[in-house]
Image (cartoon, grey):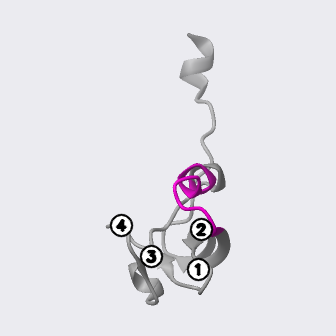
Amino acid sequence: MAMVTRYSIQDEVGRFLTIEGFFAYDDDDAVEFRDEDEAIEELAAYPGCTVETYQRPSAFPDFIATPSIEKEAA
C-alpha cells in the first residue's frame, strides 16, 4: 500500500468539516480533499478554520497525469 496526502478543514477546537457542511470530532466523517488549493478555496467559507495536511495508506495511490503519446502526436 502507498501513502497518499490528503487535506481537511478543521475549526479552532479541532473538529473536522463534514460533507454536510457541519463540524464533527470524528475524523471518519471529514471531507477529504485531494488538492490543497481546492481545500484552501473551500476554507474561504469558514473563517477561523485551517487546512490540515495528513497522510493515510491507500490501495490506490494518486496517479500523476502524464501526456499520452497519441495526444502529443495529434
Element at label 2: strand
Residue labelled with disc 3 = 30
Q: Give the magenta part as a residue range.
A: 39-50
Residue labelled with disc 2 = 6
Tell me if label 4 and label 1 are in contact, CB under 8 Å. no
Kind of residue at badge 2 = Arg
Residue labelled with disc 1 = 56
Q: From the top left corner, tell me how far across and down residue 16 is, in percent.
A: 50, 78
Q: Find the residue positioned furthest to the left.
A: 20
Q: Please give the name of the residue rendered at 58% of the width and 75% of the height, measured from the top-left corner.
A: 10
Kind of residue at badge 4 = Ile
Tell me if label 2 and label 4 are in contact, CB under 8 Å. no
Quote the CA–CA distance across marks 2 and 3: 11 Å
> Dot 1: few (<14), some (14–19), or many (≥20) neighbours within 10 Å?
few
Q: From the top left corner, tell me how far across and down residue 30 is, in percent.
A: 45, 76
Mark nearest the camera among 1 and 2 is 2
Mark nearest the camera among 4 and 1 is 4
Element at label 3: loop
Q: Earlier in the sequence, mark 4 or mark 1?
A: 4
Q: Earlier in the sequence, mark 4 or mark 3?
A: 4
Q: Please give the name of the residue rendered at 49% of the width and 74% of the height, measured from the top-left corner.
A: 59
Mark nearest the camera among 2 and 3 is 3
